[in-house]
Amino acid sequence: MVHAAFHHVPGRYRGGEGDDPEGFRRRNLDGTLRLFDAARAAGLSRVVFLSTRAVYGDYPPGTRLTEDLPPRPDTLYGDVKLAAEQALAAAGLTGVSLRATGVYGPPVPGRPHKWQNLFGAFGRGETLSPRIATEVHASDLAAAVRLALTVPQPPPLLNVSDIVLDRRDLLRRYADLTGGHGRLPLPGDPKQVSEMDTTRLRSLGWRPGGLGALDGTLEALAGG
């Protein structure tokens, strides 16, 4: 079983509880506990849970995030995901929690893509703030799920992250493809990024797409 369901305010994970934190916890944590109970009762051989880098929480910028670091979530989102990880570890199942960073890729049908509002603001010439973040392509996350389902004796925790992406570089690449002439933000500070260590996942044979996957996605978005 792959558990990737999550109820949240549209477009938000951190802060995704909106004005209903108790309902957020009940739907996402209590529902997950019932799902794990049902998986155990059904005799499932393996469960993969889509977790998040938010479980690391408030480590100082520049910290290299490894799976051995004690979690320090500083949001309800991170708290709920960590509690679900712990429940899976205690459920008597072969369970793997994938701590994924921000995910980009083709848009879900009928919904805007991840950067649609950003690209629109850029095209209108708005002033944009600098930002650097870690990202992984949706197909690379799917490949990590496949490995977690199939390798013998998988580690119970796996970081899933690929590139460190500066918003300025993202918009410059998009402008080169579209001929746009918006105002690029200032470069972000790379010292403010905490990269995720993916040594464990790579040791299983995981090879993400890097900047090539980013450029392919931008070409598709620009063409659309």
Image: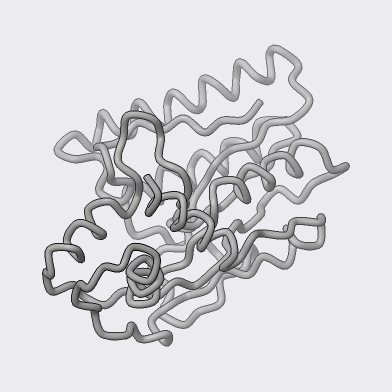
Quarter placement of the C terminus: top left
Residue placed farthest to the right in the image?
A: 152
Residue at image position (49%, 47%) is 82
Quarter of the view holding residue 160: bottom right
Residue at image position (63%, 70%) is 197
Residue at image position (31%, 34%) is 111
8 relative to 57 in the view: left or right: left
Q: Position of residue 221 (x, y in %)?
A: 40, 50
Quick check: can you spot residue 103?
yes
Q: Position of residue 190 (x, y in %)?
A: 42, 85
Quarter placement of the N terminus: top right
Residue placed farthest to the top in the image?
A: 42
Quick check: can you spot residue 132?
no
Q: Position of residue 223 (x, y in %)?
A: 40, 49
53 relative to 201 in the view: left or right: left
Residue at image position (28%, 46%) is 12
Quarter of the view holding residue 191: bottom left
In the image, is residue 155 above or below residue 70?
Answer: above
68 relative to 57 in the view: left or right: right
In the image, is residue 223 above or below residue 70?
Answer: above
In the image, is residue 205 above or below residue 138?
Answer: below
Total numbered labels placed on residues in the image: 0
